[in-house]
Image: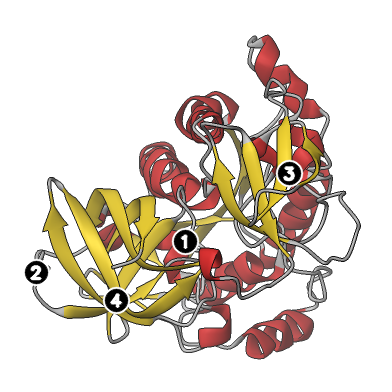
């Protein structure tokens, strides 16, 4: 019997993960990670309390499930670690004009590093578990049975050593099967909606949140021919492919096709398939391999966003970075996001997108 700490979010997935481990006879402890509030003395961080992140309700849902399962429940206060290791990096990328992915960074820095180490130490645990839809076999990360819920993209940067200390009990289940288990167990969160968006923002407008931290840097909104259509208060509020919230009316809809940092121009097109939206190559930095096989001479299947169908591409070393060349042009390849490459169902490696181009 192993002692396993389950990261409990208050949602149905982590609840069922804990339930399955209890049923298999493990000594299970439920822990809720509290990552976001005003516990730090940093005045910038305290602004973040103007969010809709209802952690109290989520923690209570997690506690309720643990009581039903008859297992201990704890709350880990990790606000300082999250601020230093995730939120600062998030803001830094925004300042650089990038579109960051804090969920990937949270998994890398928090769940499978800070949280894992504390759980092993404080609870004298053998392993941790989460409700992610993914599989681990022989210390390799694989896609789950339910490809519609595949979360391996978000796990691409988890430390390799953590693969030997982590369980994903839902890897062989589908989402409908998970909800059915929750209903049979009588969990009050059985029908709870999946969380979406950035964890520390909740349901409020992303741009409203960012304006608490970023200085306005106004510029023009122009079409692909250079005609001025309106103005904006900062490029940090927009991402490639964005359609909503441009505030320019006219003969739209319009789509963001380019962000020109040098001139502070936001370029839009009323053609959702405008050629400016597409790229055949991207350069990635901070390359991270989840296997010993760091072979860039072969073809891989590459994702540049969550839920995207993996695309065939060739990888090539490029002055310490990697150049990814796609077989077919890809829409809205976005600097700041991650390119993640697979061989069949196995996740091999990833890198942060810094630029795009056309071969």
Which label sits in the foreground, 1 or 2?
A: 2
Q: Look at the image and tell me in which quarter the C terminus lies.
A: bottom left
Identify the residue under disc 2: 295
In the foreground, 130 or 156:
156
**SS type, badge 2:** loop
Which residue carries the number 1 mark? Answer: 154
**Which residue is at a point 81% across and 51% down the rendered structure image?**
246
N-terminal-most mark, 1 or 2: 1
Which callout, 4 or 1, points at the residue further toward the start of the chain? 1
Query: Around disc 2, counting alpha carbons within 10 Å, would you say few (fewer than 14), some (14 to 19), or many (20 or more)?
Result: few
Frontmost of labels 1 and 3 is 3
Residue placed under numbered mark 3 in the picture: 221
* Image quadrant where one finds the N terminus: bottom left
Any part of residue 287 in sight: yes
Q: Residue furthest right?
A: 249
User: Residue 206 location in percent, x, y?
Assistant: 75, 44
Dots 4, 1 in contact, CB < 8 A: no
Tell me if mark 3 has few (under 14), some (14-19) or many (20+) residues whose alpha carbon lies within 10 angstroms of its own: many
* Residue 156: x %, y % from top left: 36, 61
Residue 342 is labelled as 4
Foreground disc of the pair 4, 1: 4
């Amino acid at each position: 019997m192993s002692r396993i700490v389950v990261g409990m979010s208050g949602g149905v997935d982590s609840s069922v993960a804990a339930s399955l481990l209890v049923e298999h006879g493990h000594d299970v402890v439920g822990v809720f990670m509290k990552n976001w509030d005003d516990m730090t003395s940093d005045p910038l961080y305290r602004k973040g309390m103007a969010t809709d992140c209802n952690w109290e309700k989520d923690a209570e849902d997690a506690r309720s499930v643990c009581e039903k399962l008859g297992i201990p429940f704890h709350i880990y206060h990790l606000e300082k670690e999250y601020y230093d290791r995730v939120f600062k990096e998030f803001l830094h990328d925004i300042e650089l004009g990038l579109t960051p992915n804090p969920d990937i960074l949270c998994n890398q820095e928090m769940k499978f590093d800070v949280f894992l180490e504390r759980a092993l130490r404080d609870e004298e645990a053998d392993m941790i578990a989460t409700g992610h839809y993914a599989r681990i076999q022989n210390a390799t990360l694989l896609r789950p049975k339910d490809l519609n819920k595949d979360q391996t993209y978000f796990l691409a940067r988890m430390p390799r050593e953590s693969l030997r200390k982590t369980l994903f009990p839902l890897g062989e289940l589908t989402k409908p099967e998970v909800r059915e288990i929750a209903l049979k167990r009588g969990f009050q969160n059985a029908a709870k909606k999946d969380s979406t968006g950035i964890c520390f923002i909740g349901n409020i407008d992303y741009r409203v949140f960012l304006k608490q931290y970023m200085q306005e840097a106004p510029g023009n909104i122009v079409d692909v021919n250079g005609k001025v259509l309106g103005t904006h208060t900062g490029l940090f509020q927009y991402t490639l492919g964005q359609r909503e919230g441009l505030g320019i009316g006219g003969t739209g809809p319009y789509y963001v096709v380019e962000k020109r940092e040098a001139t502070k121009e936001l370029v839009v097109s009323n053609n959702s398939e405008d050629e400016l939206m597409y790229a055949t190559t991207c350069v990635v930095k901070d390359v991270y391999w989840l296997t010993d096989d760091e072979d860039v001479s072969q073809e891989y299947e590459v994702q540049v966003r969550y839920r995207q169908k993996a695309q065939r591409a060739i990888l090539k070393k490029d002055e310490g970075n990697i150049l990814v060349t796609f077989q077919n042009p890809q829409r809205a390849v976005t600097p700041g996001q991650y390119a993640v490459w697979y061989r069949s169902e196995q996740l091999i490696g990833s890198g942060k997108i810094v630029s795009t181009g056309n071969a």
